[in-house]
Image: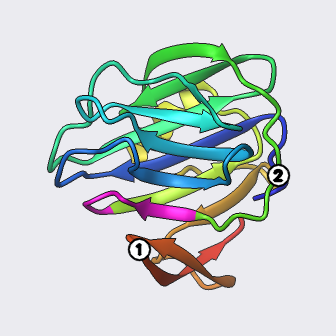
Amino acid sequence: LDGITGAFAVSLWAKPTSDLTGSSILLGKKNASDGFQVIGTGTSNNIQVDLNGTAYSASTTGLALNRWTHIVYTGTSGSPVRLYIDGLLTITGSNAPTITANNSSLLIGDGFTGPLDEAAVFSRELTGREVWEMYQSGQYAQRPEGEFLHGLNKDQNLTYRANFQMLGETQAFDFKTV
């Protein structure tokens, strides 16, 4: 995941079963000042992406409780960060910085209550059409060789095995690069 420095996209499905807090991390790999994370804002179940310690593109409508929501943040350094909720462009925010690599662990669901699925991190921007297709298919779409960086899905064939911190515990997940 340290290969993401310019263009990026983060995609996941979330079904919160309780209100998000400002410390709810849905997906992230960040230390105090470097990296990325999709987090709760602490207000009305809204979410935002934090890039190198700065918040971008906070949602204006919160995630509904007990309902699956597809979330995609995408952008490239020097261009606006875009937030898609359920396949639709919701917010176009400030220009993204170059994401700085770090040695932090990948966190999934830290401080988040409810299931998360189909987490994926791309090393390129996704188009609105690609995001819509992902939402319609209910999962990440397979991309041409070299464009998809990491997908986390326990239903895929095992290519790599890694441990991720989830809900305060270390969990093992199978994932493969496509």
Span shown in magenta: 107-115
- Answer left or right for 79 relative to 117: right
Q: Quadrant of residue 160?
A: bottom right
Q: Residue furthest front?
A: 32
Q: Secondary structure at mark 2?
A: loop
Task: Examine the rendering and report whether any part of residue 55 can be seen.
Answer: yes
Residue matched to label 2: 101
Q: Residue visible at 38% across and 50% down?
A: 24
Q: Please name the residue shown 80% across and 47% down the image.
A: 4
Distance between mark 1 and mark 2 Cα atoms: 23 Å
Question: How many numbered discs sit on the rendered protein?
Answer: 2
Give, as a three-letter code, the residue at label 2. Ala
Reply above or below: 116 against 48. Answer: below
In what element is the residue under mark 1? loop
Out of 136 and 77, give the one closest to the viewer: 77
Q: Could you tell which of marks 1 and 2 lies nearer the N-terminus?
A: 2
Q: Position of residue 130 (x, y in %)?
A: 57, 34
The stretch drawn in magenta includes residue 109: yes
Question: Residue 57's x, y, as percent?
Answer: 52, 22
Q: Is residue 139 in view?
A: no
In which quadrant of the rendered image does the C terminus lie? bottom right
Mark 2: give few (<14), some (14-19) or many (20+) Cα within 10 Å: some
- Give the residue number, with chain letter if any, for mark 1: 168
Q: Amino acid at mark 1?
A: Gly
How far across and how far down the image is residue 77, in percent?
Answer: 80, 26
Quadrant of the drawing holding the N terminus? bottom right
Q: Are marks 1 and 2 in contact (CB under 8 Å)?
A: no
